Amino acid sequence: MKIAIIILTGLFIFSSCEKVIKVDLNDTEKRIIIQGNYSGDGQVVDVKISLTSSYFDNSTSPNLDNAVVTISDQTGSPQNVPSIGNGKYQLLNYAPTAGATYTMTVVYDGIEYKASSILNSTIAQDPMHIEYEVEEPGPFGEEGEEGFVAYINYTDPASTTDFYQVVTHVNGEQMEKYVSNDKFINGSTVIDYAYGFLKSGDTINIDLRTINEATHDYYVELSTLNDGNVATPANPKYQWSNRGLGYFSVFGSSVREHIIP
């Protein structure tokens, strides 16, 4: 078994520089933004829908509560995803079928937007590594931080091409989110930095999601197009029909929790 101890966030940064993205959006054109997520393991469908009046406008995008949202598996039986306000739509207890292709349909202002995604298998995490570390002093004599550092630990399957999203929460607050792929770690055991520095009593949760390639590429391209502070996401590859912006992510999810003693 190969062992790779690497920083996958670095992979994300390098991936984002692989190509030039050309965007042909009109600055004054109103566009719908659909951010759809279906956690197969959590059996929860979460959707956020908003509207932007300008692609380059950094102001908050207005939320849309009057869209009709449905999700269906490959049998074609649609389930309604009801609005819960503030542009959010949610469906609970939606049982998954491993390997199935799911399609989400959004109808707004007489226009239908569709996107599809396959539910990939969950990749289990091994217990996270926790180490006490002391940061090196800064270049001007500043004292370095110290505390507990958490590392995600899992084995990438050698037989498949995999794409990941790692989401880290500390004491219930999201602290880190990044995507990666197994281009350089296929079949390896991965021990990767998740978060630091933690103190006694802190609770850390690491969510390892097996996402689809289109969602991975969306986040990589987003990091290229935006500086991280732009409120409006964009998707030049248009996962949604009729040039809808955003993404539809169907994923398996493996969660590990650790309380720092």
Image: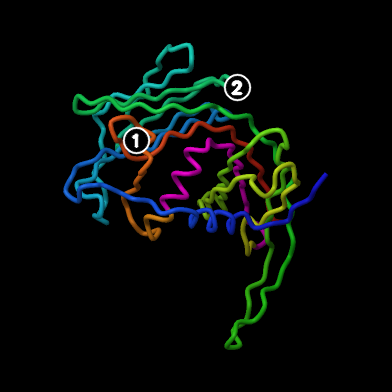
Q: Kindly state the secondary structure of the residue where label 2 is placed.
A: loop
Closest to the observer: 218 or 250? Answer: 218
At x 33%, y 31%, the residue is 84
Position of 190 with respect to 226 (left or right) is right
State the quadrant of the N terminus.
Answer: top right
Compared to residue 130, the image places residue 246 above or below, namely above
At x 57%, y 88%, the residue is 140
Residue type for callout 2: Ala
Residue type for callout 1: Lys
Q: Is residue 102 magenta?
A: no
The residues tagged by marks 1 and 2 sit, at their Cα atoms, a distance apart of 26 Å
Position of 30 with respect to 249 (left or right) is left
Closest to the observer: 20 or 136? Answer: 20
Farthest residue to the bottom: give it. Answer: 140
Which residue is tagged 2?
98
Q: Kindly state the secondary structure of the residue where label 1 is placed.
A: strand
Q: Is residue 211 magenta?
A: yes
Which residue is tagged 1?
88
Task: State which region is magenta.
Answer: 199-222
Closest to the observer: 196 or 233? Answer: 233
At x 74%, y 41%, the residue is 187
The x, y position of residue 74, in whole percent, is 48, 15
Closest to the observer: 2 or 92? Answer: 2
